[in-house]
Image (cartoon, rainbow, N blue to C red):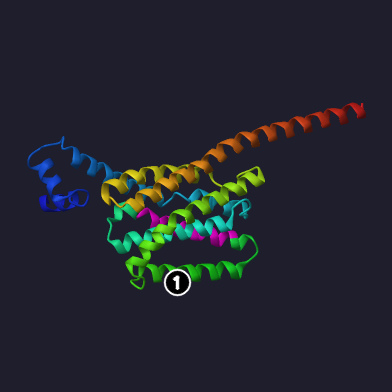
Amino acid sequence: MADFAKQLMLFVMDEKCYENYFVDFDFFDADCMKALISKGLGFGIIAGSVLVKVPQITKILKNKSGQGINLFSVCLDLLAITIHMSYSFVSGFPFSAWGDTSFLALQTALIAVLVLFYGGSTSGAVAFGGVYSAIAYVLMGGLTPLKYLLIAQGLNIPILLLGKLSQAYTNYRNGSTGQLSAVTCFMLLAGALARIFTSIQETGDQMMILTYGCSSFANAVIVAQLLYYWNADKDKKAAGAGGASKKAKSKAKKTD
C-alpha cells in the first residue's frame, strides 16, 4: 500500500520533492511547492479542457446554426492547437504541460464539422473530418521530424493571432458575437493565462511560453468583445421592446 501511495505521489512530483515532503518533512521548499502547484494546475486545466468547448458545441446544436462563427478562424485555431500538440508530444514534454490541447483539438475539429454541416455542406463536413485525422497522424505518428515541428511551432504565433483576430473582426463587422459561447471564451482565456505559468515551470520552452502569451492576448480581445456586445445587445432588445410597446399603444388609441 505504501509503495502504491509513493508511486501515486511520484506522478505529481519528482523523487527529490517526495523525499523533502514525506521523509524530511520539509513542507516549505519553494522549488517543490512551485512544481507541485504547476503540476496540479496543469492537470486541472486538462480536466477543464474536456468540457471547455462543449458549451459552444451545445449552442450550435441547439440553434442548428453556426451563424457568426468564422470558419477560417476555427480552422486556423485548430491548426495552431494541432501544431502545438504535435510539437509537445514529439518533444516528450510532460502530459500535464500540454494534454489539454488534445481535447481542445477534438472539440475544435467538431465545431468546424458542425459549422460546415449546418452551413449545408454535409460532404464538406465529412471530408474535413477525414483530412484532419490524416494530418494529425502525419504530425504525431513519427512521420514528421522534430526540427520541422519546431519550425511549425514558430509559425504558430502568427497563425494563432490571425485566427483569433479574424473572429474578432467578424464580431466587429457583425456588431455581435453571434453563436459564440461566453463560457467557452472565458475558459479559454483562463486556461491560456494559467498555461504561461505551467510552461515556465514544467518545460522552460521559450516558444511555448510566448505562444501562450499571445494566445492570452487574443482570447482577451474576444472576451472584451463579448462583454461589450453583451451590453449592446441588451440595449437593442430594450429599445426594440420600447418601440413595440409604443406601436401597441398607438394601435390601441386608433381602435378606441
Residue drawn where x is 15% and y is 49% of the image: 5
Residue 245 visible (yes or no): yes
Q: Nearer the viewer, residue 8 or 139?
A: 139
Q: Can you name the residue that lies furthest to the left here?
A: 24
Task: Locate the C terminus by quadrant.
Answer: top right
Q: Residue at x 54, y 49 (%)?
A: 165
Front position in the image: 109 or 206: 206
Q: Position of residue 220 (x, y in %)?
A: 49, 41
Question: Three-letter amino acid code at disc 1?
Answer: Ala
**Residue at x 33%, y 71% (from the top left corner):** 142
Q: Position of residue 53 (x, y in %)?
A: 48, 51
Query: Does residue 240 appear left or right of residue 178 in this picture?
Result: right
| Pick the front one: 247 or 232 | 232
In the image, the segment drawn in magenta is 99-115
Place of residue 10 in the rendered image (x, y in percent of width and height, measured from the top left): 17, 51
Quick one: SS at disc 1?
A: helix
Residue lying at 34% horizontally and 55% vertically, measured from the top left: 99
| Image-based side of 27 in relation to 253, left or right | left
**Can residue 178 be seen in the rendering of this structure?**
no
Q: Which residue bears the numbered disc 1?
A: 134
- In this picture, is 153 found above or below 178? below
